[in-house]
Image: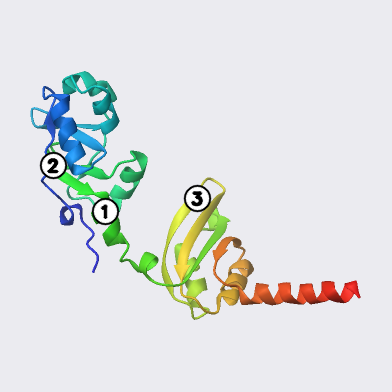
Amino acid sequence: LCKMLITDYLSKDYSAFNTNDAVDMALATVQEFGFTHIFVKKNDTFLGGICKEFLEENPDKKIESLLIHLERFAILENNPILDSVKLFYTFNTNLVPVIDKNEKYLGYIAYDDVFGELSKYPLFSENGAILTVETSAKNYSMTEIAKIVESNNVRFYGSFINLVNEDVIQVTMKISAGNLSSVDETFERYGYNIIHKFYHDEKEDLIKDRYQHFQKYLEF
């Protein structure tokens, strides 16, 4: 069973630095751990993170002189783990600070721990086909998408939305390999556009094969 809460991944071996601490001390720590950021606090209140590159450029200064480069990101201790995914991506970081409701630094969660756990989900762990479909925003229904897949005796392992705007929504899904041409046809019958498909399409191969035979026939 995959763990879903931030507290399941919380590590406390990487302290936040005070604004009057020396940059060279912080730099030695971040290099030892192999992390992308240090975290800064003032009077036990979390302020944010500073990227390692700024420390490397200013080793002889105090951290307070680098607060102009402070990045304000953190996650609350009682949040679900999926909330951290966007933070890892947005701030190009391999750790996310964890705070409580009073903005006190509690520790961090690491990229490797979170994504190692997420890889156990069927969406990532099961073998199968990957399909991206597009539908109008007003007609979008995840329930309908799952029903279309399962109505063709195909398993629906999971999905995510990879594009959304006022007009359309694109959904990428992982489904079991089998009866995939029928899945395609059902989606098209319900008005969905097939944007991408990553699997071996036997029906498409058959059409290509027949076309090649027809081309050879015309050459005679």
SS at badge 2? loop
Which residue is located at x 73 percent, y 75 percent? 209
- Please give the residue where the numbered disc 2 appears in the rendered image: 14
Per the image, the residue denoted by label 3 is 163
Q: CA distance from mark 2 to mark 1?
A: 15 Å
**In the drawing, what numbered circle is on residue 195?**
none
In this view, the mark in front (2 or 3): 2
Q: Amino acid at mark 3?
A: Leu
Of the pair 26 and 76, the residue shown nearer to us: 26
Q: Nearer the viewer, mark 3 or mark 1?
A: 1
Position of 101 relative to 65 (above/below): below
Q: Position of residue 203 (x, y in %)?
A: 65, 76
Q: Is residue 18 above or below residue 166?
A: above
Q: Amino acid at mark 2?
A: Tyr
> Residue 171, position in %: x, y?
49, 58
- The residue shown at (28%, 48%) is 84
Pointer 3 with pointer 1, Cβ within 8 A: no
Looking at the image, the residue that sits furthest to the bottom is: 153
Crowding at dot 1, Cα within 10 Å, few <14 / some 14-19 / many 20+, comes out as few
Is residue 174 found left or right of 107 in the rendered image? right
How far apart are labels 2 and 3 at the CA level? Answer: 36 Å
